[in-house]
Every structure is written in C-alpha cells, then in structure tokens.
Image: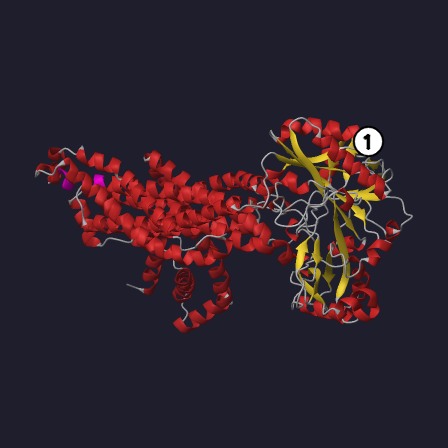
Amino acid sequence: MTPRLESNWRRYLSFFGSRPERDVDDELAFHVQARVDEYIAAGMEPNDARAATLERLGDLTRYRGETLAIEQQEQRRRNMSDVLHTLFGDVRFGARQLGRNLPLTIAALLCFALGVGANTSIFSVVNAVLFRPLPFPDSDQLVMVSEGISNLAADINRISAADLLDYKETEGRAFESLAITQSRRPTIVVNGDAQVINGASITPSAFKVLQVRPLIGRAFLDADTAASAPSVVIISDAFWRRWYGADPAMIGKQITFTGGATAEVVGIMSPRFAFPLPGLGVSVADIFFPFRFTTAVMNQRADNFNTLAFGRLRNGVSTAQGEASLADIVRQMPERYPESWGKARNRGGNLLIHVKSLRAAAVGDSRRPLLVLLGAVGFVLLIACINVASLFVARASARKREIAIRTALGASRGRLMQQFLAESLLLLTAGSVLGLVAAHWGTRALVALAPGDFYSSFDTSVDARVLALTAGLTMLTALVFSILPSLPGSPSDADRSLRTEGRSSTVDRTRQHGRRVLIVTEVAFALVLTVGAGLMIQSFARARAVNPGFDALNLATFRVNLPAAAYTDPDRIKLAHQQIVQRLREIPGVLAASATSDLPMQGDWMIVFTPEGAAPSQLPVAMNALILPGYFEAMHIPLRAGRVLNENDTKGTRGLSYVVRSRMAPASVAGSIRTAVRGVDPNLIVVNFLPVDGIVGSTIASRKFNAALLGLFAALALALAATGVYGVLQYSVIQRKREMGIRIAIGASSSDMIRLIVGQAVGLAAIGVTIGLAGALALTRVIRALLFNTDPLDALTFSASAAVLLLIAVLSSYLPARRALRVDPTIAMRTE
C-alpha cells in the first residue's frame, strides 16, 4: 500500500476513534504529499518538489499546533457530550428501576431522609454553638474578663464594677476597648398591664467592644451616664415588635415603669442582636440602660461582684497577653485602694484576673452534651444507611440475571458501578432534599423545646457548612452503595447466574453474609444508643428525686415592686411587706405566707464567712438571703437547732419574692393574691406569679431535654434495627424458598421452621449485642461527666438494653418465620 493510500485509509478510519495528534499529522502529511505529487507530475525532481512544497505551505509546525488545539477542543466537547449522554441515560434507567419496586424505593427514601433530617437538625445547632462565628464582627477578638480571690473557695466569674475604670488603662495597648453589663429586671407598664422584662445596664463602650450600633436611633453616649442626665433606654427588636407593634415612631417615646418612672427610647437594635449571651449565666436583655458609676457602686469595690466584664483585644494580641496586661493593673490595686483591696490582701485574699474568649465563656459546659447528641444522631444516620444498604444489596440480588447478562456482554465492573452510582445518587439526593426540609422544621422545634433561651440566641439556620456535610454524606453513601452490589462475582459466577436463575449461588451466599454483617453492625449501634439513653434517663430520674430541702407542692411565688418614689423610708418599706404578708395569710385556703430576697435555686448572692476555730486555707462562701418571719414554715424547711426569725429581726428591703402555700393549686389563689396586694396599696402590681415546682423543674430541665433527645434517638435506632432485621430475614426466606420447601417436604415441623428463622435472628442479634456492649463501655467514658449519681457501668441498664435488642430480634423474625411455613414444597422444588 502506498504512503498516500495508507494516509487516506487512516483518515477514513478516524471516524471510528479519534486520535487528535495522529489525525492532524496524517492530514498535514496528506496535503504535503499531494502537493509534492503535483510538482513531480509537472516535471520537478522529488527533492526540489518537496522543497517547493514546504516553501509554498509555510510554517507547518505553527499550523500543526493551531489545528491540534482546535481538534483537541472539539474532542473534549464530544467526550463531554458522550459523558452527559451516558449519565442521563443511566439516570433515566435508574429512575425506571427505582419505579419498578416503588414500596422498596419509598422505604429506602424515607429511611435515609429520617437519618439525614435528624443528623442535620442536631448538626445545625452544634454548628451554630461551637463553630459558627458569634454574631459580632471579628468575634474571635472578643473576651470575657473575670476576677478571683486567691483564698476564696468559689469562682466569682464576675468583677467588681468599679474596677473597670482601672482596667480601661490597658485600652490602646492590649485592648481596643473594655465594657461591663449588669443584669436588671425592670417592670414595665403597657396599656395598664405590668410585665417583668429582662434588662441590662451597659456602659457606652459596649457598642464599641461588640462593634454594633442600633438599627434605628443612636447608641448610648458618655453623657447619658451622668447622674443628672435624663433617663434613656435602648430596646431590642423583639421587644419593640411584641409590646409596641413595631411602631415606626418609637424613637423619642417614653416607656413607663411601675411607680411612674419613665425613660426615653433612643435606639432599637437589629433582629440578630442578642446580648448578653445566655451561656454567660444571665438572660438575653430586651431593654438596655446606661450604666452609671454611682457613689454606691464605687464604694462596693472588692465587695460586690455582680458585673460581667468583656472586651475586644487588639489585632495580634492573645488572651494570655491581654491577661498579663491586666495583671499589671491588678498588682497595683491594694496600694491604690487600701480600704478595699488593701484590706482583702491583708486577710490573705490576693486579687486574681482571668481572660478567656467570649465563645468559650458562652458555650461553657454545653460543649460535651452537644457533642454527645451529635454522636448519638450520627449513630441513627449510620443505622439508616445500613438499612438502605441492605435494601440496595437485596435489589442487586434480585437483578442478578440482568447483571450477569451485562457482564457476559462485556460490561466492566466499573461500568456496573457507574450505573449503580447513578441509581444511588438519584435516590439519596431525593432523600437528602427531603431530609433538609424536615431538618428545617426539626431545628425550629428543637430550639423551641429546649429549656431557656440558650439555643434560640444562636443562628441555627442551614449554612454552607451544613449543606456541605449533607452533600458529602450523600456522595459518600452513594459511592459505597454503588460498590456493594458490584463487588461479588466473576465470569464463572455470571455464567452460573444465567444457568441457575432462582437458585442459591456463591454470589447470593456472599451477599447474604454481607447483609448479615450489616445487621450485626446495626444492632451494635442500636445497643450503644440504648445504653446511653438508659443511663441519661436514669440520671435525670435520680436528679429529679433529690430532696431540695423544701416542699414545692402547692407553693407559689411572685414579686411586688415597691415604687421608689413612694417608698423611700425603710420603716415604710418594712411595714408594706408585713402588711402584704398579713393580707396573704388571711386569704381562704392559704396555709402560710412569707417573703425572701432570693428564692432557693435562683439566688446568686454569696457571702464570705469565717468559721470558728482555726482559720481555713480557703475562706468558705454561702448563699445569702434576706427573709421575713414565717419563711421556714411556708417553705416547710425544718429547723435543726435554735429559733426562727421574728418581727424584731427584720428590716426594710425593697425587692422581695413572696411565697404562698395553699391547700389547692397555686393558680386557684392567683386572683385572691392580686386583690390582697392591691388592698395594701392600689398602685402595687403582682408580677412573675409562678408555681415553685416549675422553678425546681427548671434546674434539671437541661438534663431532661438531653435525656429526652437521647431516648428519642434510641427509639429511632431500635425501630430501624427492627426494620433491618425483618427485611433481611424476609428476603432470606424468599431467597431460600427452595431450601424451605425441601425442609418441609422431608418432614420439618412448624416449630422447626420457626426455630430456624428465629434462631438466625437471635444469633445475629447476639453477635451485635456483644459488639455493642464493648462500644457502650467506651461510651461511658464520654458521658460519665453528664451523669448525676448514676453508675456509668450500671448492670441493670446494660442487661435491660441487651434484652430489649434480643426481644426486638425475636419479634422482627416472627413474620418471616410465618412466611416460611407457607412455602409450597412442590412449587419451590420445580426450579430443579
């Protein structure tokens, strides 16, 4: 064959498989040879003809490069088109396959959506609390500042407000700015109704520290803190909408408090602003007042530690450097203030300073419970994935003839995986979308049901990190599911599948073993969750059973704020409290009444005391409360020794919480209580009327919430495990129909068949339980710190959890066992 003829054939053959570089070279060679032949035919010598051709055609190297680039671009376009065509074909075929067994598809879809939805809901909360930046610019520079006393047997976690003025000397060096906030509980009057509102006094520098400004109006000015300055407030967006209907003319209007005091609204914060963060031990404020350094505040240095301090570090300054900068000031405090910090030092109480990130302070002890819940819901997702994997393997077994034909026709394992991947992605993407929709509402429900306002103060919306996690889980799960059905098999297995359809084969037995491994894993995960939930529920039950030292049954509490303008004399204040208590005791059905400055489990007024005898190395502290006579009787607190307080021991104090014990539920006497209080003074208003047992319950609400969530996840895990065991055994009976028929034909009784199927289920569950017990032992190390008065190795919890899993295995295997009894031996053996 001549070179020219060979070149022509290569050009025609290129239609069946393009090779760009060789194709371009062949094309150029064809044109060069054609021109050379033309010159030779005209009478030129071959060498001269080639030289003339090259001169005529020009720079062939450049032509080759440009043509090759165009050809390669076109080839990439054709390849992409082929890939998309194949992909769309796989998706269409996968959709038809999923539609052929709609109940199985819906079961897998809902199972995966359940796992993704639960996992995304919990991760959204974890992401908001632990990973997402706080809702302030450059929030990693925000820190909390707290004081301590070296010989005090308690952590203060606050500062003495007056000390802030000294600490502000570090501004410009280590800190950009420092500020303080102090919790307040004002009572506002709107349309004649009184309501206690969460409030806070803040220094004007707080806005500089947080780098925020009111959405409407202005921030506080230094002039607002002067004693003679008019009263001004800034309100939250929620407060503005709830109480004033988002009045657009709110700026400049007056808010009225009990007693007739008013304050002008000068600013409204944005909807996203929430401060102080609830993890700091105080409630999110709805109304803000300018903090004023009054004479009383300045005189309480080294005595009253009820103020949160926070600041913004300068760029490049670490928390350790910020703490060292403040420590320089702290060392000078005894000399600067000998009457306060100087005396404290003389008693062995050296002032300490601590600085830590605002996020760490806000998260506090919530990190471990959140991570435990995330791990628990991760187990639920894994169990859901195992169930879906079992369904995919079962579908692959049902399609073994189709797979065998594809393999016999030359389909590679990679091509089969591609088809299964398309089906998996189609199903799991739909499940993920459904799960995300469920997670949106699930997260809202989770935040709404959580105790307090801790979670609600964080932005728990779905962000890029949550979407990336969901997409990653979907892709990884789809990839695994596409590998599982195509792993077993060889050419001989394919040939055997074609010749023995309907019978058991090596491939089937391999897949059966694989499904059994999945079920064992599923049971093990379910046991770990069940043990964890059992321990948390037991811990909550024991915390609830603790005797608080008083009887909360039929006990109510409320507050009455005495107007400052009308009640200035201590004797009049004392008389008002005595008259209110007397009126309360006269109400029919009331057994006892009194008042206290701090209710049990709610007070934070600590005092330092020195016990008799040798001085301890650390001064002990005690919770302090001012009470009126009859308090111990009303609370049913027994007196161990001595006497109770009487009228001669009391003195006037403005803010008290009243306690009333009645024969009936507190709500039954609420109206009578309000009437009795107004009988003393028509201007007095009852606020915060609550049953005391609700206050007691709030102290263990977080334990109850965590235990309830773990219990819910454990219940989901048990339900999924039961479904998985049932599905595997049901399919096993179908696949072993011929074996079942033979067993029945040779005389196997009903009890024999039931023992066979149930025994298989119990055997798988027993292996899973054994593995799960080992995992549960490891889990106890993680949740030990969350348990109250509960042995993390409680034998009853472990044994009960194992028994529940084994019982579920028995119950889940009953229906498959009944199906095995209905196998007709004559029909089952016709496959021979």
Circle count = 1
Instruction: Give the residue at x 87% y 49%.
Output: 224
What residue type is disc 1 on? Asn
Does the magenta run of residues contain 818?
no
The N terminus, quarter of image: bottom left
Q: Which residues are magenta?
A: 733-741
* Residue 134, percent from left and from top: 65, 53
Q: Is residue 55 visible?
A: yes
Residue 535: where, in percent of width, then height?
44, 49
Residue shown at the point (50%, 69%) measured from the top left:
55
Horizontal arrangement in the rendering, residue 574 relative to residue 97 (left or right): right
Secondary-structure class at tag 1: loop
Q: Is residue 782 above or below residue 233?
A: below
Task: Estimate the x, y position of residue 683 in percent, counting from the top left.
Answer: 82, 31
Q: Position of residue 826 (x, y in %)?
A: 10, 33
Mark 1 Cα within 10 Å, few/some/many (few <14, many 20+)? Answer: some
The residue indicated by pointer 1 is: 683
Relative side of 291 to 619, left or right: right
Q: Is residue 734 magenta?
A: yes
Quarter-of-image position of residue 675: top right
Q: Which image quarter is the C terminus in?
A: top left
Is the image coloured rainbow, by chain, by secondary structure, or in one colour? secondary structure
The majority secondary structure of the magenta stretch comes to helix
